[in-house]
């Protein structure tokens, strides 16, 4: 790719719309957890399992999707993924039992996981010299959907009841039409097929240690962020707040991440990745703690600040790893977005189990200190200067 070229704005927008469409329906899960918890009499451990299921399946699906995307020119994953999420996630409102609920969430999560590696891998091809910023634009599509989606589904369920959720499929129909018309075929590199494990080895080469450190940081970020997104709604619902109020809280948390992701991406193109990671993870600690202790409406400020810093480096993890290992962009994206987030999701039920034993607020209070581990890990990653 010629880095002197300008970014292809139309393709970047189309890929961002893919991200928005696929994640829009997946964003329904967190605000509905208090309602599902009441309907099925779930424990906090089961709530953690529901929330972590999407990440668990990402752990399994995304690396395989990234491998196929790097070797075959197909739009199956990038378009089929959002379609699966659109069809299955809204059905959670009419599931007859807990096990069918798990099936609907599982298929929706598979759909959500399918498109991420291909779409994120294509950003590098069309970003020109503005890679970090373009990746942040792409990430903004998913973050905005996680900001708007909870408000949308909270309004639908509180107004029309949980059984009305399947009607939300109608929103995705025009979006899918636009995607089928505007998303290009992904480009692949001509190289021998070494199999999934062989492709990972070939992709990472001599930078596997650096990529592993960035991956670990992404796992830590995912674990902390997903734990807050999962259990803060449950905590405030138990304290008497309405479903709409909880939806607003989640939306502020995630929309703040969209703003910070753009800012972080822009700054990374100018001063590199490492200082952005260190500063944001240090500030994550006090801001998440504010989310737990601020009284009344001030909690909205805590939600914004907490989301602003804990989610700011999500696109930069992918961009930094792709800079280090550019030969398998989709594969690297799957490792950063799928394997890392999936591993963080596997740990979410642990948060629920501890919350069953103690309290949600006390467990989340301890988790606010975990991002300090990321600062230590990032210190040992050599800086790779971002594109001039």
Image: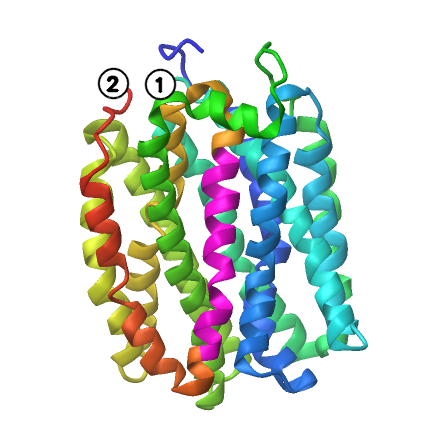
Image position of 348 with respect to 69: above or below: below
The part of the chain drawn in magenta is 333-353
On residue 355, which mark appears? Answer: none
Q: Label 1 belongs to which residue?
A: 129
- 133 left or right, relative to 233: left
Queried whether the magenta region covers residue 222, the answer comes back as: no
Give the residue pinned by disc 2.
388
Residue 273 appears in view: yes
Q: Where is the C terminus found, in terms of image quarters?
A: top left
Q: Say which element carries label 1.
A: loop
Q: Is residue 281 above or below residue 303?
A: above
Q: Around disc 1, counting alpha carbons within 10 Å, would you say few (fewer than 14), some (14 to 19), or many (20 or more)?
A: many
Would you say residue 141 is visible in this rendering?
no
| Residue 156: x %, y % from top left | 66, 71
Question: Residue at the right extreme?
Answer: 96
Compared with 186, 154 (above or below) is below
**Nearest to N terminus: mark 1 or mark 2:** 1
Q: Are marks 1 and 2 in contact (CB under 8 Å)?
A: yes
Q: Is residue 56 left or right of residue 261?
A: right
What residue is drawn where x is 60% and y is 61%?
53
Q: Quadrant of residue 116?
A: top right
Q: Which residue does the image show at 64% across and 20% down from the upper left?
A: 71
Q: Residue at x 42, y 25 (%)?
A: 204
Magenta region, mostly helix, strand or loop?
A: helix
Residue 361 in percent (x, y) is at: 35, 81
Q: CA distance from mark 1 to mark 2?
A: 7 Å
Residue 213 picture location, percent across and down: 32, 40
Dot 2 alpha-carbon crowd within 10 angstroms: few under 14, some 14 to 19, many 20 or more: few
């Amino acid at each position: 790719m010629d880095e002197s070229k300008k970014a292809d704005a139309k393709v970047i927008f189309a890929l961002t719309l893919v991200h928005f469409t696929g994640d829009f329906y997946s964003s329904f899960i967190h605000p509905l957890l208090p309602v599902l918890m009441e309907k099925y009499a779930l424990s906090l451990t089961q709530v953690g399992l529901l929330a972590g299921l999407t990440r668990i399946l990402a752990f399994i699906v995304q690396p395989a999707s990234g491998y196929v995307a790097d070797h075959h020119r197909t739009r199956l994953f990038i378009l089929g993924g959002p379609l699966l999420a659109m069809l299955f996630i809204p059905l959670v409102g009419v599931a007859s039992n807990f096990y069918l609920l798990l099936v609907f969430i599982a298929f929706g999560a598979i759909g959500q996981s399918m498109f991420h590696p291909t779409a994120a891998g294509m950003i590098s091809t069309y970003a020109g010299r503005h890679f970090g910023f373009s990746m942040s634009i792409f990430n903004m599509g998913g973050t905005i959907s996680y900001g708007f989606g909870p408000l949308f589904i909270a309004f639908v369920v509180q107004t029309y009841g949980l059984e009305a959720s399947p009607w939300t499929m109608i929103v995705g129909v025009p979006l899918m039409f636009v995607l089928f018309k505007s998303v290009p075929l992904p480009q692949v590199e001509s190289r021998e097929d070494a199999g999934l494990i062989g492709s990972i080895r070939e992709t990472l080469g001599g930078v596997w240690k650096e990529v592993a450190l960035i991956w670990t940081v992404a796992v830590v970020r995912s674990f902390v962020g997903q734990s807050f997104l999962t259990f803060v709604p449950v905590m405030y619902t138990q304290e008497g707040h309405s479903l709409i109020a909880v939806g607003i809280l989640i939306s502020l948390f995630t929309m703040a991440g969209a703003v910070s992701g753009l800012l972080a991406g822009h700054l990374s193109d100018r001063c590199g990745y490492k200082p952005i990671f260190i500063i944001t993870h240090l500030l994550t600690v006090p801001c998440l703690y504010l989310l737990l202790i601020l009284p009344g409406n001030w909690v909205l400020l805590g939600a914004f600040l907490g989301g602003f810093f804990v989610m700011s480096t999500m696109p930069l993890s992918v961009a930094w790893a792709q800079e280090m290992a550019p030969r398998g962009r989709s594969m690297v994206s799957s490792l950063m977005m799928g394997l890392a987030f999936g591993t963080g999701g596997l740990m979410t039920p642990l948060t629920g189990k501890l919350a069953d034993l103690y309290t949600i607020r006390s467990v989340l209070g301890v988790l606010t200190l975990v991002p300090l581990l990321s600062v230590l890990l990032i210190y040992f990653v050599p800086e790779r200067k971002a594109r001039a």
